[in-house]
Image (cartoon, helix red, strand yellow):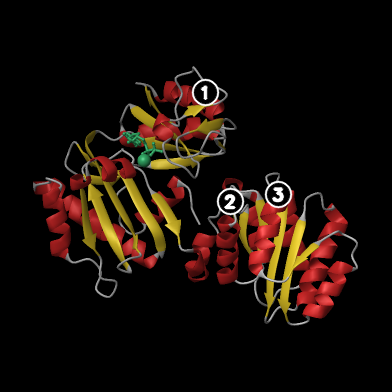
Amino acid sequence: MNIHEHQAKELLSSYGVTVPLGAVAFTPAEAGAAAASIMEKTGGHMVIIKAQIHAGGRGKGSFREHPDAGLAGVNVVASGQTSLMGERMTELAEKMLGSTLVTVQTGPSGKVVNRVLLEAAVDIAQELYLAIQLDRRIARPVLLASTEGGVEIEQVAAESPEKLHTEVIDPAVGIRPFQLRRLAGRLGLTGKAASSYVDLARRLVAAAGELDTELLEINPLVINASGEALALDAKLSFEDNALYRHPEIAGLRDESEEEPAETVARKAGLNYVKLDGRIGCMVNGAGLAMATMDTVEHYGGSPANFLDVGGDTDEERVATGFRIITADPNVRGIFVNIFGGIVHCDVIAKGVLAATEQVGLSVPLVVRLEGTNVELGRRIIAESGLGVISATNMAEGARRIVELCR
Ligand code: ADP
Ligand code: MG
């Protein structure tokens, strides 16, 4: 699960991570008032307005509705007077809120901006990169750091890997002070900047561990003109399986940023991930679901989704899953592949029927059922009059649905 930058900064502040003074706004008037108040509190003349969407690249992004307005997802306003600052920010926020921001990370369809972050402008001396993520090969979190802040890290890794420094974090003892000092040295930091960096990085590592993040990315992490390290951007992605330990974080979810079908699925207790292919797959068990996707690919097809209806599923949940698949306009055919251990095949058959009665069925459907109550399940499907093609094993089912979708 992802959260917004302003939420991430609030969470990180509670770990003592330094961030610029800021406030979130949902309306133009709120944005204007927040900008004026930031100016008064800091005595600075520049305030930043940042679109809050679950995607990066905002600084270089543009709005679909304002293509030549010189408006990006991150903008700066300078003014000597708080009243003028308030007016200018209100106008800017009016343009940004409700408009669609397109960045390299949103893809061409972009994302609608529903909130903005107003923030004191920082006098940047140096932009760095820092991330904490899991390295699955060594099964440990690693700290990644680079002097190339503000740049896509994939580009740094590809073009100048020598600028990417790594420290492995021992989950039992955390990161050790010498590792952080070594890192600061490799980044060329000295004096106050080095000690401030070490302190900030230590707090970020603690936050990542306690909050169960999959990814914590600060890009850029800046050193300001007086040698202090600050988090200027913040991205936090949480491990979904650990969210039950953090109800306050689960409450930060913004459904408007998520794939609508995935939200419906999550609420129904289904494990669904939308993909770009053409063949809808409904399977029980994550392992079988993965194998089904591979088999579909093997026969030249492309899966439209991953869907695990679970072990102790019921008719309603199966029907919800089936409706989600049929609602995807990319789907040209559906493959139901069930190995009934705990789940009963007749429950699956009834769920599929209930869904097709409601929403109809306009694409070919191949069903492979095996296991508990298989005879009953097959009979329900056969007598449904839906023209369902049944397969006796996974390979045959995958091959048939791929053929039918051609
Ligand atoms: P994104 O990664 O989506 O482009 P960032 O938050 O990284 O958005 O902002 C883009 C750039 O804008 C940063 O690299 C930095 O140069 C500048 N910036 C962002 N916030 C501030 C701020 N509070 N003060 C000064 N510059 C900022
Ligand atoms: Mg950034």
Residue 405's disc number: 3
Q: Amino acid at mark 1?
A: Glu
Q: Amino acid at mark 3?
A: Cys
Of tags 1 and 3, the one toward the viewer is 3
Measured from the top left, where is residue 65 in percent x and y? 57, 24
**Image point 49% across, 40% down: which residue?**
52
Disc 2 element: loop
The residue identified by callout 1 is 91
Against 293, residue 222 (above or below) is above
Q: Amino acid at mark 2?
A: Leu
Measured from the top left, where is residue 168 in percent x and y? 24, 64
Quadrant of the rendered image containing residue 322: bottom right
The image quadrant in which ligand 1 is located: top left
**Image point 40% across, 49% down: which residue?**
235
Against 299, residue 233 (above or below) is above
C-alpha separation, residue under disc 3 versus residue under disc 2? 17 Å
The first of marks 2 and 1 along the sequence is: 1
In the displayed orientation, state which residue is furthest to the left: 191
